[in-house]
Structure formats: structure tokens, C-alpha cells
Amino acid sequence: MTNRAILVTGASKGIGAAVIRHLAKENRAPGIAMVARQSDYYDDFVREMRTQHQSVAFTPFFADLGREEDVTALLDGIRKSKIEIFGLINNAGYTNPKSINQIETNDFEYTLRTNLVSPFRLVQFLVKEFAHKLQFVLNVSSTAGISGRAGWLTYSASKAAMINMSEVMREELKVYGTRVICISPGRCATDLRRTLAPDEDPNTIMQPEEVAAVVDTLISGVGRMIDSHNIVVRR
Ligand SMILES: NC(=O)c1ccc[n+]([C@@H]2O[C@H](COP(=O)([O-])OP(=O)(O)OC[C@H]3O[C@@H](n4cnc5c(N)ncnc54)[C@H](OP(=O)(O)O)[C@@H]3O)[C@@H](O)[C@H]2O)c1
């Protein structure tokens, strides 16, 4: 395999897109493999990246991470692409804030599949597929996973589980030489944040580019010297 890439989920916008922009600009990888659902803005972003960074191979994959069959097809697609994934940034995240009385079980399960089970499936697949070649996994949790807020039950629960899942992964994947990093951003100006806090002025909070710069440091050589136990990222 000659194609080596970092795989970033939630690649179409927000923090994921900012991370991809940053990694491409700094030439951190010969390839960047990306995952999001099909959309015009995802297509536009891929086009923009290909135009601006012609030395980087961008490979978009399309999947709804809340759908088991999509994830199975995604893993198959990654295998068939023959791209060697040497780093995973599990960034995709979904939320649909509701009070306890309004939560639908289906939506709770969809949240858990998107934010927790699919990130797990990706890690399990990449470890089996690439073993010692997988250098790092960076899981994006949230400060909402550290302390819950009214109306955020499904999201908070998924993010709390992400923090603990990362602990286990960190222990178990040491043997492969895979670093497992977990970050918990605070308020960051993206669509997801707008869903959680519609009245907030996005100019007053952390920007996706700031999180991207932290991610870049954490996956770098310098990042090896930072204790990667659930790192809170906030202004
Ligand atoms: N913004 C904050 O304040 C904040 C704070 C703490 C943690 N986080 C975490 O940061 C991560 C990135 O979120 P963001 O703030 O950048 O939000 P965003 O701008 O809404 O982006 C979310 C990304 O996840 C993807 N995604 C969502 N549901 C998906 C699904 N079912 N299947 C595939 N892809 C899906 C979206 O792609 P589509 O185009 O397919 O929708 C999009 O690329 C999330 O894990 C979030 O929980 C955010």
C-alpha cells in the first residue's frame, strides 16, 4: 500500500472541516480520508480542498454513522480503497436536545450509534486491518460528557461513554503502539452548538480553527508528551 491517510469523520463542516483544512495546510499527511453524509456542502468542501491542496489526496466516503448498514458499507469501502489509515479522528457528532419526557428511544439509539458505536466500530476495524500501523486515535467527546445539562440527556450520555471508552482503548491499544487521545471541547461556534444554544452569539465563543490547532498539536510528536486523558479544550 502506498496511499497513507488520516481518516476524519464529521468531515463536511464545523470542527472536522477545520481540522482537515489545518492538516492539509500543514502538510501532515499524504492523504486525508473523510466521512460525512452526502450533501452539496460536503461536495463543495472536498472540491475546495482538492483545488487548494493539490499535493494531498482527499478521499471522501459517504455514510450515515447512525445507520449500522451504512457503517458496514463504509468499512468495506475503506478496505477496497487500499488506503492505509495511520490515524483516526473520530469527530462526527449528532445531537437532538429534548427533555426526558420528549425523548424518543429511536433518537436516543441513533445518537448512541452515531456518537459512540460507530466510532467504536471504526477503531475495531482499523486495529484489525492495520494493527501496528495505526499510530493514533483521537476521539472527540465534549464537556457535556463531563457534566450533564437539562435537555441534553442523549448527547451527554453518549459523550460520557466516549470518554470512558477512550480510557479502555488507551489501555488495550498500547500493545499496538496506538496512542488514544480524547478531547472534550467546550462551546465552539458550529451548527451543532447552534442546535444546543440557539440564542448564543457565535463570535463570543471558541472557533473551530482553535480546536483544529489543538488537535494538530496532540497528534504531533509534541503531543506524545501530553497526558492524553480526556483533555478539555476551551477558551
Ligand atoms: N460545537 C461545540 O460546541 C462542541 C463542543 C463539544 C464537542 N463537540 C463535538 O465536536 C464534534 C464536531 O461537531 P461540530 O461542533 O463541528 O458540529 P457540526 O458543525 O454540526 O459538524 C458535525 C459533523 O458531524 C457529521 N455528522 C453528524 N451526524 C452524522 C451522521 N449521522 N453520520 C455521519 N456524519 C454525521 C456532520 O456531517 P453531515 O454533513 O453528514 O451532517 C458534520 O460533518 C462532535 O462530535 C461534537 O459533539 C462540539
Image (cartoon, helix red, strand yellow):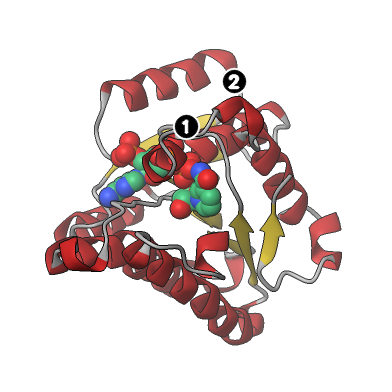
The tag earlier along the polypeptide, 2 or 1, is 2
Q: Nearer the viewer, residue 10 or 130?
A: 10
Residue 3 in view (yes/no):
no
- Say which element carries label 1: strand
Q: Nearer the viewer, residue 125 or 95?
A: 95
Circle 1 Cα neighbour tier, 10 Å, few/some/many (<14 / 14–19 / ≥20) = many
- The image position of residue 61, as x and y in percent, is 32, 41
In the rendered structure, are the residues bearing label 2 and label 1 in contact, judged by CB atoms less than 8 Å apart? yes
Q: As shown in the figure, which amino acid type bears the numbered disc 2?
A: His
Question: What residue is disc 1 on?
Answer: 58
Residue at 17% x, 61% y: name it. 102
Q: Label 1 CB, ligand 1: below 8 Å? A: no
| Quadrant where the C terminus is found in the figure | top right
Mark 2 residue crowding within 10 angstroms, few (<14) / some (14–19) / many (20+): some
**Residue found 37% across the figure and 60% down from its top:** 152
Amino acid type for the residue under numbered disc 1: Phe
Q: Nearer the viewer, residue 134 or 188?
A: 188
In percent of width and height, residue 12 lies at 40, 33
Please state the horizontal and vertical placement of residue 190, each as a whole percent of the image: 48, 35
Residue 160's place in the image compared with 95, above or below, is below
Q: Is residue 177 above or below residue 209?
A: below
Classify residue 55 by image quadrant: top right
Local secondary structure at mark 2: loop
* Quarter of the rendered image showing ligand 1: top left
Residue at 35% of width from left, 67% of height from top?
Answer: 153
Q: Quadrant of residue 98?
A: bottom left
Q: Position of residue 80 (x, y in %)?
A: 30, 51
Q: CA distance from mark 2 to mark 1?
A: 9 Å
Mark 2 = which residue?
53
